[in-house]
Image (spheres, grey):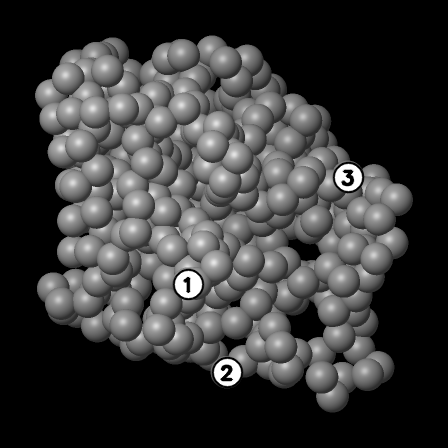
Amino acid sequence: QYTSGSTGDPKGVMVSHANFLANVSETEDIWPTGRDGVVVSWLPLFHDMGMLFGVLLPLCSGIPAYLMEPAAFIRRPLRWLEALSTYRGTHAAAPSFAYELCVSALRDAGDVDLDLSSWRVAANGAEPVRWRAVRDFTETFAPYGFAPEAMTPGYGLAENTLKATASPADRPPTVLWVSSTALKDGRLEIVGETAPDAQPLVGSGFPSATTRVRVVDPVTRTPREPGRLGEIWINGPCVALGYRERPQETQEAFGGRVAGESGAASCLRTGDLGFLHEGELFVAGRLKDVIIRNGRNFYPQDIELSAESAVPGLRPNCAAAFSVDDGERERLVVVVETDGRVLREVGAGELRERVGAAVHDGQRLRVDEVVVIRRGALPRTTSGKVQRRGCRKLYLDGALGVVAD
């Protein structure tokens, strides 16, 4: 099972039959399908979420599954929801950006004939879950029968077969409004929604009884206290066997040892940053993607979210933020892809200025360069996630195809 390649070269993860069966069992425990369960999926079958949720879960649970080609969803996202309505789907999963695409598609299409009242589990994962995506999808499709508690964020990765934590399907998702200033310093400070530096974080749920999730200082390898940011480490029956033909990387990722616990089992070092609050996991971003400015940590997905709000008409998941070293200092670059309609309305130069202003307003961070490219030119994985490192390489190679004024 290959990793998506969103943060580096895709690596083959060796997943045993026991790993898959354990993950199916954990998924059934928190999101039971029942005898009337129906899965509807467009996810690629060669990725962990599509394989487990689209094939193995219905196969082991004895329920029907209706599968679509990924391209059919990307071309017209509402096809997915129409299939859920037609076949009375109860379980479906997708990354956060897919729910955002459905909201945009409905706004373009106007009213449609949908009945989503049968949908009990709308699993949302594969990347940090955006509160805007959760809120907008829930509010937009409530008139069509979608229940708030059906939105069930989770956290997982190929190295853990798939799911590591998940939100229960009997309550709406947890959202914490936290101080972005404190978060950049690596600590949790809960504030009111109207606080000047308030930032929403969506909870990714809880591990099962057989999986242990810990938050560890990535340098000292000591456990973090609840509410302190650190690297997410996992131990349990779903942790895969390692990377195929990559012994050194296998040892680095799968051989994590917590300081002072020499006799304990090794852990999977996920490379993701997060914290635990009242037993629930909150994911902040990728350890290797963190942008450090003046001793503070900035997360690219927050910068990208601000950039996407700069101009009406920009699509979700259309930006990539990364830093580059020019020999004198680290520079922040934001790449934004857009279509001809937005360019005709505001122009590339105006778009760059608005993106820079939006990032400054949202993150109190100055962007050194905003690059505008045509829609479809932003490198993505086969599951649709932005490849920040791939985008950075194209930028450095001068191969992004920048839109001129």
User: Which one is earlier in the sequence, the residue at label 3 or at label 1?
Assistant: 3
Q: Name the residue carrying label 1.
A: 329
In the displayed structure image, the side of residue 56 where residue 75 appears, left or right = left
Residue type highlighted by circle 2: Glu
Q: Evaluate if marks 3 and 2 touch, with contact meaning CB atoms under 8 Å apart.
A: no
Crowd band around label 3 with a 10 angstrom C-alpha radius: few (<14), some (14–19), many (20+): some
Q: Is residue 53 above or below residue 248?
A: above
In the displayed structure image, the side of residue 358 where residue 401 appears, left or right = right
Q: Nearer the viewer, mark 3 or mark 2?
A: 3
Q: Return the x and y of residue 21 as percentages of the image width and height.
A: 76, 42
Q: Name the residue carrying label 3.
A: 12
- Name which residue lies at 40% across and 30% down: 98
The one of 39 and 318 positioned closer to us in this rendering: 318
Residue type highlighted by circle 3: Gly
Q: Evaluate if marks 2 and 1 touch, with contact meaning CB atoms under 8 Å apart.
A: no
Which mark is drawn over residue 225? Answer: 2
Q: CA distance from mark 2 to mark 1?
A: 34 Å
User: Which one is earlier in the sequence, the residue at label 3 or at label 2?
Assistant: 3
